[in-house]
Image: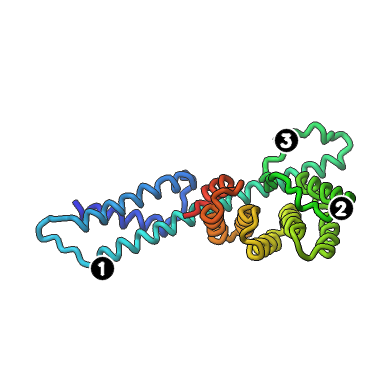
Amino acid sequence: MNYMRITFLFFCYFWLSTVGFSQDRTLSDIRAELPSLFGEIKSLELQLKTSKVENLIIKGEHLDRIKSIEKELINIISQVENLQYRIERIVREGTNHIADIRFRLCDIELDCNIENFSLGNMLGKPPVRLKEIPGNSEMFIGLTALERNELYLIETSLRAGNPTGVMARLEVFLDAYPIGTIRTELMFLLGKTLMVEKQWSKAAKVYLDIYSSFPKVPRSGEALYYLSVSFAESNQFERACLMLTELRVEHPRSNFVNDASQKAMELNCQ
């Protein structure tokens, strides 16, 4: 019986490793079956370790082989999860491009009214949510009323997803305030600007600079969260998961802990 189960499991492993997805099987079907197969391998490993059947010889290489299969299966599960995430992302972005083309075509057609387009035409990926956090009155110390109003307008533009002209305005502030609390706030605004512009590598660098320079400030958790988002959007999933773990362990009281847990599930962080 054990021999038959071993043969069956080895066949399943071989099938998963070498056979492409058939047309009548979805990625979700494959994903749903992988944990069951993983459980079978763990069960078989336990039986081999505890079996008292006479004349059953269990050599070390057999257990080593099972552990190797187990490791490869975990890797396959992770790859399937990442593949599904990337496929969904491609579909969303592709749909956004199609919707954008429809709007542009409608704009040049005489009988087309853009107002008749519903939100359902924009089925692609929503913009990254720039979560609002409680304001920090101390950041405005030393700023003129005009400067405070300028920062308010910058934040409003970013939340509306409009980064036009924001970068140039921020550079003026960054040159004027090279140190201090206001510098940290300006760096966060810079990171959010780069995210809205989808410059993920540059955004990741900014948030990494914030966290490495100010690891104990109240908004460290926010920096780690947006760093993980930037990594994920750059397809650096392992780094993204590492940052999410760091956030939940080092900053358990952060306003972004729940967001981090949700993002970790989305990325299938182990």
Q: Nearer the viewer, residue 8 or 255?
A: 255
| Dot in front, 3 or 2 | 2
Residue 147 is marked as 2
Instruction: Look at 44% across and 48% down and name the residue there.
Output: 30
User: For the residue marked with disc 1, what is the amino acid?
Assistant: Glu
Q: Residue at x 39, y 48 (%)?
A: 35
Q: Is residue 185 visible?
A: yes
**Alpha carbon separation for disc pair 1 and 2:** 70 Å
Residue at x 76%, y 64% (from the top left corner): 179
Q: Is residue 55 above or below residue 262?
A: below
Q: Which mark is residue 138?
A: none
Viewer-nearest residue: 165 or 70: 165
Whichever of callouts 1 and 3 sits on the residue coming sooner in the sequence is 1
Q: Using the image, tell me which numbered label, if any, was put on residue 61.
A: 1
Query: Mark 3 — residue?
Result: 119
Say whether disc 3 or disc 2 marks the residue closer to the N-terminus: 3
Instruction: Look at 87% across and 34% down and name the residue there.
Output: 111
